[in-house]
Image: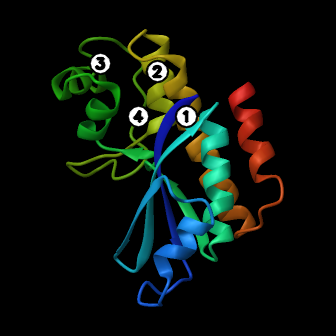
Amino acid sequence: MKTHEFTIIASGLDPETEGYEDRFFEAGCDDSTLSFQKGVIIVEFSREAVSFSKAVSSAYEDVSRAGAKVERVEPDHLVSLSDIAERSGLTRQAISLYTRAERSSGFPNPVARVTSNSPLWDWLEVTEWLHAHAKIDREAVVNARIVKEANRFLELHDGQADNFTRRLEMLEAA
């Protein structure tokens, strides 16, 4: 088994309630760190599982069992130049050269804040490009796809657990 690190953002429980942490521990979140920031519950996992999709889906089930509503999975799919460098293990300068087509062509275009000094890219698109240029492994692409699709599923189905696990496992198998 491998240890997978990710975060679930949740809502619906008051951290001031007695036994708040115990609810998560008893629901199976004993491999996580809880915090409450900016009005949401942050559940940071370091979960052992045979695959990333199984780690995320079992964490989703555990957080739901604790009585919280899963809002999203992080790390976020929108990334800055610094985020790309950190996640890929490449330098910020190298990423900047890729974005300006000075080192290679075809780097994805920003998808948000395109006209600002701090544009954002879609992490899945970036991982696909970096993998195609042998800069990161396939696992990074699969994990990016799982997080993006998990969040899309959560947004479209508003907390309905039906097919969540099956959908994530299909992505990993593809």
Q: Earlier in the sequence, mark 4 or mark 1?
A: 4
Who's the residue at 55% across and 34% down the image? 143
First along the sequence among labels 3 and 4 = 3
- The answer to whether residue 49 shows anywhere in this view is yes
Residue 105 falls in which quadrant of the image? Answer: top left
Type of the residue with mark 4: Asn
Q: Which residue is disc 4 drawn over?
A: 109
Element on which disc 2 rests: helix
The label nearer to you, 2 versus 4, is: 2
Give the mark toward the camera: 4 or 1. 1
Residue type at tag 2? Trp
* C-alpha span from label 3 to label 2: 13 Å
Q: Does label 1 or label 3 sit earlier along the sequence?
A: 3
Q: Position of residue 167 (x, y in %)?
A: 77, 44
Q: Which residue is mark 2?
A: 129
Q: CA distance from mark 2 to mark 4?
A: 11 Å
- Residue under label 3, please give it: 101
